[in-house]
Image (cartoon, helix red, strand yellow):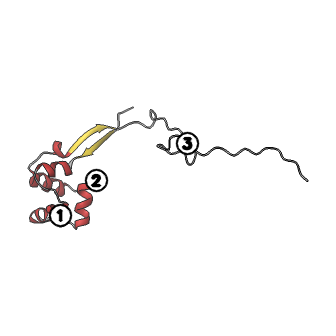
Amino acid sequence: MAAKLDYHWHLRKVMADRGLFSTTDLIPLLDKRGITLSSSQVYRLVVERPERLSLKILMALLDILSCTMDDLIEPTAAASAGTATRTKKAVGAEAGVGDLRPKRARISSFERP
């Protein structure tokens, strides 16, 4: 079975290393290279991990940030679903509650009048 690959997206870190701390700083720089994106599209590009990315946008980012693809994209091995064991928890059994759990109600026998 082939290993499944995943990746980490480091655009925000690379931008910070280059002194670009606001996502909207990219809009005019991309526009100079013929790429028009809205502020929400640029925000998602910086903050979230893109599943699909145009090569024109990728090349523009590499040019703007003077970096390589290795700086932006870090390949990693994905955790396989077979090795991860999940345990079901009861409703209300969230982590961090500690000793503050309700006691289960017990119904005892009672006499009818």
**Residue 72, percent from left and from top:** 19, 46
| Residue at image point 15% right, 48% down | 14
Q: Residue beneath label 1, please? A: 24
- Residue 88, placed above or below residue 43: above
Task: Specify the amino acid type for callout 1.
Answer: Thr
Q: Residues within 10 Å of mark 1 (few under 14, many from 20)?
A: some
* Comes first in the chain, label 3 or label 1: 1
**In the drawing, does residue 74 fall left or right of residue 78?**
left
Q: Are marks 3 and 2 in contact (CB under 8 Å)?
A: no
Mark 3 lies on a secondary structure that is loop
Mark 1 lies on a secondary structure that is helix
Mark 2 lies on a secondary structure that is loop
Task: Specify the amino acid type for callout 3.
Answer: Lys
Q: Which mark is residue 50?
A: 2
**In the drawing, does residue 109 fall left or right of residue 53?**
right
- Residue nearest the observer in this picture, 52 or 28: 28
Q: Which mark is residue 89?
A: 3
